[in-house]
Image (cartoon, grey):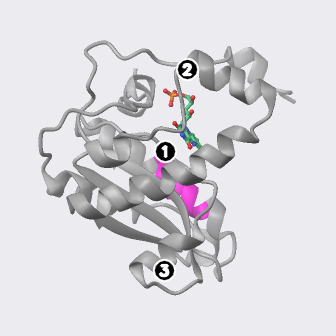
Amino acid sequence: MSTILNLAKRRRTIRSFRHDEIDISDVYYALRVAREAPSGANKQPWRFIIVRDQSLKKRIREYCEEVEKEFHSRAPEWLRDWFREMGITWRKPFLENAPILLLVFSDGTAPYNVQSTWLAIGYILLALEERGLATVTYTPSKVRWFNELFKIDKRYVLQTILPIGRAACDICSKQPRLPLDNLILGVY
Ligand SMILES: Cc1cc2nc3c(=O)[nH]c(=O)nc-3n(C[C@H](O)[C@H](O)[C@H](O)COP(=O)(O)O)c2cc1C
């Protein structure tokens, strides 16, 4: 089995983190990997903010939880059922408990900025896995507040917050995948 396939198979979403510090050089390693991702017209529209400050993490958690309460109250029934099954609520302790938050923005003025940034995010997920670190691609439904908080131009749009740390579970289950045959619509 190739290394990439191993990493991809091993990687799974983690929503609960141990408090131990992590080496920030591992996060920089993931950013160096992200930097190599392809992008529309090579505009490299991904931008990052690293948050380690505990009081800032607390503010982010408080804001996100307010937004989540509203989101959960208007979520469609099927999604609420899935949240229940997964034990996902409006509470987001991982925003405070993970030692590092990596905020990923896209430059909204660049072509295909969202697609390109999410490709880079995919690279980051595998790079973190390679370094033995865990994360969740947390996507708050309201993002403008982050531009005010960090005083950054509104051309930058938050795509995800990646809380990064060590998983707080020994055996963390992986969500099932569809068989490959179901994914291939045709081979000609
Ligand atoms: C675009 C995207 C948005 C996501 N948003 C959230 C989120 O806001 N909160 C969350 O807990 N998980 C989020 N996830 C994680 C998914 O729920 C998770 O990847 C999926 O259930 C498959 O599980 P696995 O990553 O363990 O294989 C998101 C994943 C993606 C790719």
**SS under mark 1:** loop
Please name the residue that numbered disc 3 is placed on.
148
Residues at discs 2 and 1 in contact (Cβ within 8 Å): no
Would the CB of label 2 be found within 8 Å of ligand 1? yes
Would the CB of label 1 be found within 8 Å of ligand 1? yes
Residue 90 at what x, y percent from top left? 54, 38
User: Residue sitting at 42 percent across and 54 percent down?
Assistant: 62
Mark 2 neighbour density, 10 Å: few (under 14) some (14–19) many (20 or more): few
Where's the N terminus, which quadrant?
top left
Which amino acid does the dot numbered 1 rest on?
Answer: Thr
Residues at discs 1 and 3 in contact (Cβ within 8 Å): no
Does residue 51 sit above or below 138 in this rendering?
below
Labels 2 and 1: the sequence-earlier one: 2
Q: Judge depth for marks 2 and 1 and give the one in front.
A: 2
Disc 1 from disc 3: Cα separation? 22 Å
Disc 2 from disc 1: Cα separation? 15 Å
Is residue 63 found left or right of 170 in the rendered image? right
Q: Report the magenta residues as a range.
A: 116-122
Which amino acid does the dot numbered 2 rest on?
Answer: Met
Please name the residue that numbered disc 1 is placed on.
137
Q: Main secondary structure of the magenta part?
A: helix
Checking the image for residue 86, the label placed there is: 2
Does residue 179 sit above or below 44 in this rendering?
above
Check residue 118 for magenta coloring. Answer: yes
